Amino acid sequence: MRKYETVLIVNPEISEEERQPLFDKLKGLVSADGGMLVKFDEWGHKRLAYEIKKHIRGYYLLMVFCGDGALVKEVERNLRLDDRVLKYMTVLVDEAVDPEAIKAEIEAAKEQESKRETAEQATSEGEEKGDAEPVETSEATVSETEQIENTAETSEQEGPK
């Protein structure tokens, strides 16, 4: 089993409801052909480096999966036929992957995601209540700021030379 990364750019003009069936189809393809979906990360709208099919922006998506060459061909065939996809690129990340290690990686990623979500919820609840803790600044940062301000004041007092 090999590990692949596919980055694709979707037409930015389509809505979330129109994008979701495409993403579900990709997830289904990977699982139906005996592959494992490791990561499915939506990067969102970004500016393109150059115009693609008269679009200057695109909706980016990163999909990391494990499978064989036939799975990659099938995924790329579906991406090629779909008009919503502007560009895609698949790269081989690892030649030989242990399925058990990948399962452990997936579980660790899910656990990390859930911890991050709970931390975000706690932070947002604290902000709503007004219990947000003040941000601590180091003494070095404060002294550097004071130094910069003092330098600016002395140069203003001296005037133009």
Image: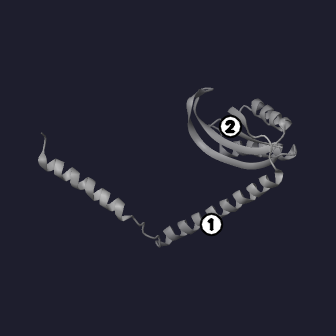
Q: Position of residue 69 (x, y in %)?
A: 83, 35
Which mark, by number, is residue 56?
Answer: none
Q: Position of residue 147 (x, y in %)?
A: 26, 56
Q: Where is residue 31 in the image (x, y as percent from the top left)?
A: 84, 47
Q: Where is residue 51 in the image (x, y as percent from the top left)?
A: 57, 27
Q: Residue type at mark 2?
A: Leu
Q: In which quarter of the image is residue 101?
A: bottom right
Q: Identify the residue shown where x is 83% and y is 45%.
A: 35
Looking at the image, residue 103 lies above or below residue 1: below
Residue 127 in the figure: left or right of residue 94 = left
Looking at the image, residue 145 lies above or below residue 8: below
Q: Could you say whether the residue bearing mark 2 is in a helix, strand or loop?
A: strand
Q: Name the residue under label 2.
A: 8
Query: Mark 1 Cα within 10 Å, few/some/many (few <14, many 20+)?
Result: few
Foreground residue among 27 and 105: 105
Q: Which colour scheme is used?
A: one colour
Q: Quadrant of residue 2?
A: top right
Looking at the image, residue 147 lies above or below residue 53: below
Which of pointers 2 and 1 lies earlier in the amino acid sequence? 2
Which mark, by number, is residue 118?
Answer: 1
Q: Identify the residue shown where x is 65% and y is 35%.
A: 11
Do the residues under discs 2 and 1 have CB atoms within 8 angstroms? no
Foreground residue among 159 and 86: 159
Query: Mark 2 Cα within 10 Å, few/some/many (few <14, many 20+)?
Result: some
Residue 8 in the figure: left or right of residue 78 = left
Q: Could you say whether the residue bearing mark 1 is in a helix, strand or loop?
A: helix
Cα separation between marks 2 and 1:
30 Å
